[in-house]
Image: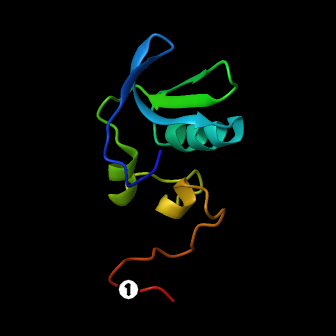
Amino acid sequence: MALNQGKHIIEVIDGKRCTLVDSGISAIRKEFLKSILEFNSYEVKTAVDEAGLWKIGVTDVVFHAAVDIYKRKLHSPNGKIITPAYWLQLTDQQTESEVNYWMGFK
């Protein structure tokens, strides 16, 4: 799901109420998100539909990916803060130092 979408969706996945993190995704994207979420101590549930596309959710029903990413609450397994570009897999690199909006981009 896009980070600019404010809609909070609750679904039942694997018999548990979950906040839907993303749906209609590939197995590779599911594993990428699952690794991040489990590292950040969320219980992750996944399901596949008849078209072979995945949906992923967390059992914490107040979780909201956009809020947690922009509040810098999510970290990667190497200890770096998850950026919006990294979450959306627009880049596979995370910067060595944090880029803050007041510092500008170089």
Spot occupied by residue 53 in the image (x, y as percentages of width and height): 65, 29
Spot occupied by residue 21 in the image (x, y as percentages of width and height): 46, 37
Residue 16, compared with residue 56, is above or below; it is: above
Spot occupied by residue 14 in the image (x, y as percentages of width and height): 51, 13
Colouring scheme applied when the structure was drawn? rainbow
> Left of 26 or right of it: where is 79?
left
Task: Please give the residue where the numbered disc 1 appears in the rendered image.
Answer: 103
Q: Residue visible at 61% across and 56% down? A: 89
Spot occupied by residue 103 in the image (x, y as percentages of width and height): 38, 86
Residue 45, compared with residue 36, is above or below; it is: above
| Residue 62 seen by the camera | yes
Q: Residue visible at 47% across and 60% down? A: 84
Q: Residue visible at 56% across and 60% down? A: 86
Of the residues shown, which amino acid type is indicated by label 1? Met
Picture quadrant of residue 78: bottom right
> Left of 37 or right of it: where is 4?
left
| Residue 83 seen by the camera | no
Residue 97, compared with residue 13, is above or below; it is: below
Q: Secondary structure at mark 1?
A: loop
Mark 1 closeness class: few <14, some 14–19, many ≥20 residues within 10 Å: few
Q: Residue visible at 46% across and 10% down? A: 15
Q: Residue furthest front?
A: 51
Q: Residue furthest bottom?
A: 106
Count the labels in the image. Answer: 1
